[in-house]
Amino acid sequence: MIRIVRSAAALSALVLATSVAIAGPGHGGSPVGEPGKATLATRTVEVDMTDNMRFTPAEISVWQGETVRFVVKNSGAVKHELVLGTPEELKEHYAMMLKMPGMEHADDNMVSVAPGKTGEVVWRFTKAGKVDFACLQPGHYDAGMKGLVKVAQKAGAPKTDGHGSHKH
């Protein structure tokens, strides 16, 4: 019972931290974007996760304002996940996962996928710049299971994330 309560408390803290990160006071939303609606997705990007601790592709290019449906396949024999976030958010979340390896969690910016299964994340990239993604299962992030979404600024759109311009 204590373990369940501790996990519930940690999950509550994670949800609160994630909510605060997404709300981002004074930032006009999260630097990584916002949950998207599947009906508004302009394209689907297939991402494969493997036990060699890699995403394929590990780099994805999108346009500012674009809603993308990520279809995430786990080709490995162990659980993997894809979590979108800032490097700081990902590192903080990963540290929590190391402390509580059995912790189950779910949010709009992530999907956990069992071996041989497929899941999806629908995300709207609201700001130009870079958005990181990673697998936060214990040991996977440290092994290099990371990727990058390059969000190109649309002509005439305001650039507000401070990461510098990325052209295709």
Image (tube, rainbow, N blue to C red):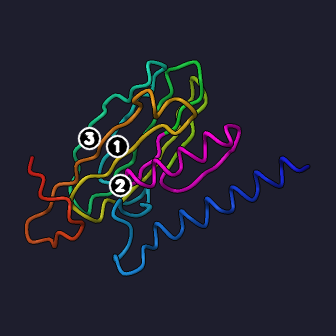
Give x and y (percent) for residue 29: 38, 72
Q: In the rendered structure, which amino acid carries the disc numbered 3?
A: Ile
Mark 3 or 2 closer to N-term? 2
Provide the secondary structure element on which disc 3 rests. strand
Q: Residue 44, which numbered label?
A: 1
Q: Locate residue 84 relative to residue 161 in the image: left or right.
A: right
Viewer-proximal residue among 45 and 55: 55
**Residue name at image x 42 percent, y 73 percent:** 24
Q: Is residue 100 above or below residue 40?
A: above
Give x and y (percent) for residue 164: 14, 59
Give x and y (percent) for residue 35: 44, 61
Residue 83: within the magenta?
Answer: yes
Q: In the rendered structure, which amino acid carries the disc numbered 1?
A: Thr
Front of the two marks 3 and 1: 3
Viewer-proximal residue among 123 and 127: 127
Q: Which residue is mark 3?
A: 60
Q: In the rendered structure, which amino acid carries the disc numbered 2?
A: Ala
- Label 2, residues with CA under 10 Å away: few <14, some 14-19, many ≥20: some
- Label 3, residues with CA under 10 Å away: few <14, some 14-19, many ≥20: some
Viewer-proximal residue among 142 and 16: 142
Q: Which residue is mark 2?
A: 41
**Residue name at image x 53 percent, y 44 percent:** 94
Viewer-proximal residue among 162 and 75: 162
**Residue name at image x 43 percent, y 52 percent:** 122
Mark 3 or 1 closer to N-term? 1
Magenta part of the chain: 82-109
Answer whether labels 1 and 2 touch (C-beta < 8 Å): yes
